[in-house]
Image (cartoon, grey):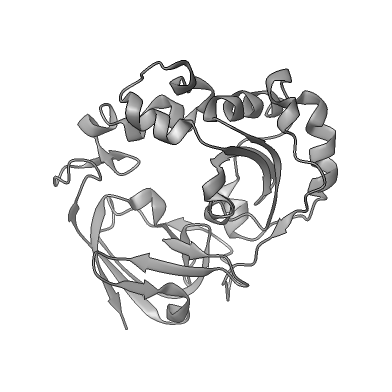
């Protein structure tokens, strides 16, 4: 889902020639019916393996290289190719942000500067702050590796969806972590910025979570009670991760 930074966050489900403003569907009953697979790379009806790609494409496309999940493996700044140097230069050789985000706990992460605050919204963070802004993905990656020795790099998605959160002074936490930034990235430390606060459109948080898996349940219907991160939250405690179901073609029924 595409997002717009507002209070609360505005969500849009984009189609080839149309879109749905998802906030308007709160308290409405929605049916999700699986139709087929469609790999994000080859477009074929082949079972999705990871990240919206079929098995073959996941191991071939540059959009699923190891450096995506592990930025410290980026090599475009050395003019070295992983799968497609032109694509890797385009993505890796641009400003990146290392940040702290608080979704269920404080975590450190990496994103392209153009993805701020979208990345924080997608993670369901209710507050976030930048630590460094570096010129390439490699420097962001080694900074993240250094900092995750002192702070988590994963979100507890269950606690995030239940809204089990604790407000933390991220400015103080950022200052405490400054000493652990690698020498190559110290000059890019961001001074005196403020944390960003994020509000999500949720009418009712779940108490027990049931994750909708389209591989096991082809049809589902429920009343939409909230949207947080990339999750749809339903009245019966079912949650549906839209992002993790990329590559699945569904029929969306609104009642």
Q: Residue at x 14, y 47 (%)?
A: 45
Q: In this view of the protein, which residue sits in the foreground, 200 or 215?
A: 200
Q: Residue at x 47, y 68 (%)?
A: 11
Relative to 16, is 167 above or below?
Answer: above
Q: Residue at x 65, y 62 (%)?
A: 198
Q: In this view of the protein, which residue sits in the foreground, 73 or 152?
A: 73
In x, y percent, where is residue 199? 64, 67
Left or right placement of residue 117 versus residue 69 in this view: right
In x, y percent, where is residue 86? 33, 28
Q: In this view of the protein, which residue sits in the foreground, 139 or 107?
A: 139
Question: Is there any visible trace of residue 238 in the rendered image?
Answer: no
In x, y percent, where is residue 188? 71, 32
Q: In this view of the protein, which residue sits in the foreground, 217 or 103?
A: 103
**Which quadrant holds residue 64?**
top left
Left or right placement of residue 135 versus residue 65 in this view: right
In x, y percent, where is residue 207? 59, 64
Relative to 234, is 113 above or below?
Answer: above
Question: Is there any visible trace of residue 70 in the rendered image?
Answer: yes
The C terminus sits in image quarter: bottom left
Left or right placement of residue 88 versus residue 43 in this view: right
The N terminus sits in image quarter: bottom left
Left or right placement of residue 56 versus residue 144 in this view: left
Relative to 128, is 191 above or below?
Answer: above
Q: Residue at x 16, y 42 (%)?
A: 46
């Amino acid at each position: 889902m595409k997002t717009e930074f507002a209070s609360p966050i505005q969500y849009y489900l984009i189609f080839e020639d149309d879109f749905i403003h998802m906030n308007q569907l709160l308290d409405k009953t929605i049916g999700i019916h699986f139709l087929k697979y469609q790999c994000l790379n080859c477009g074929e009806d082949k079972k999705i393996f990871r990240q919206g790609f079929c098995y073959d494409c996941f191991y071939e496309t540059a959009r699923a290289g190891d450096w995506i999940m592990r930025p410290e493996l980026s090599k475009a700044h050395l003019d070295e190719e992983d799968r497609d140097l032109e694509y890797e230069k385009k993505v890796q050789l641009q400003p990146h942000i290392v940040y702290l985000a608080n979704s269920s706990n404080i975590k450190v992460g990496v994103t392209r500067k153009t993805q701020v605050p979208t990345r924080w919204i997608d993670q369901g963070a209710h507050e976030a702050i930048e630590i460094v802004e570096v010129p390439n993905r490699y420097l962001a990656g080694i900074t993240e590796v250094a900092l995750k020795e002192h702070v988590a790099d994963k979100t507890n998605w269950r606690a995030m969806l239940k809204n089990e959160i604790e407000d933390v002074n991220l400015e103080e936490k950022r200052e405490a972590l400054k000493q652990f930034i690698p020498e190559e990235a110290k000059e890019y430390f961001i001074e005196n910025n403020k944390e960003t606060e994020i509000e999500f459109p949720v009418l009712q948080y779940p108490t027990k979570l049931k994750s909708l898996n389209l591989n096991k349940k082809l049809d589902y219907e429920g009343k939409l009670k909230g949207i947080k991160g990339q999750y749809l939250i339903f009245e019966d405690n079912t949650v549906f991760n839209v992002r993790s179901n990329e590559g699945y073609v569904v029929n969306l029924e609104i009642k």
